[in-house]
Image (cartoon, rainbow, N blue to C red):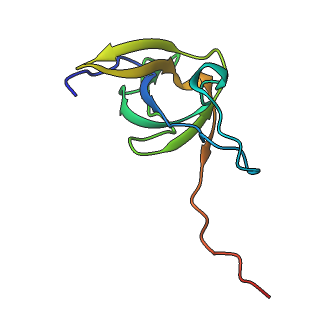
Amino acid sequence: MKFRPLHDRIVVRRLESEEKTKGGIIIPDTAKEKPQEGEVVATGPGARNEQGQVVALDVKVGDRILFGKWSGTEIKIDGEDYLIMKESDVMGVVEAQATQKQAA
């Protein structure tokens, strides 16, 4: 991708939602909600504080994030759909589980 967001903006690729419910019911495209989870694909350098210093972002490329339902602006780059949003629109980073649950 040849796009660099400015300041505290990030570019996010939405992660696809499940096409089936846990009960096995297939959900048609028209009934699906847009996922609120995505992967960060590009970040800006950060916002400036009152002293004029650049404050680095908390998210980095590759992070899986959760964001609000109406967050960001949809854009298309090289034929692929992305969202561009401010870091403040991110609710949190989904951490990989360090330990797997063990069956008892």
Number of residue marks: 0
In-front residue for pair 57/37: 37
Residue 65, quarter of picture: top right
Residue at the limit of the structure toward the left, as seen here:
2
In-front residue for pair 29/100: 29
Left or right: 73 in relation to 6: right
Measured from the top left, where is residue 53 in percent x and y? 42, 24
Measured from the top left, where is residue 17 in percent x and y? 58, 37
Measured from the top left, where is residue 19 in percent x and y? 59, 39
Quadrant for the C terminus in the image: bottom right
Measured from the top left, where is residue 58 in percent x and y? 51, 39
Left or right: 30 in relation to 2: right
Measured along the vertical axis of the image, is residue 21 above or below residue 97? above
Residue 83, quarter of picture: top left
Residue at the limit of the structure toward the right, as seen here:
104
Measured along the vertical axis of the image, is residue 104 above or below residue 35? below
In-front residue for pair 81/41: 81
Measured along the vertical axis of the image, is residue 96 above or below residue 84? below
Identify the residue at horizontal 40%, vertical 45% (top origin).
62
Quadrant for the N terminus in the image: top left
Left or right: 92 in relation to 3: right
In-front residue for pair 56/21: 21
Identify the residue at horizontal 38%, vertical 21% (top origin).
81
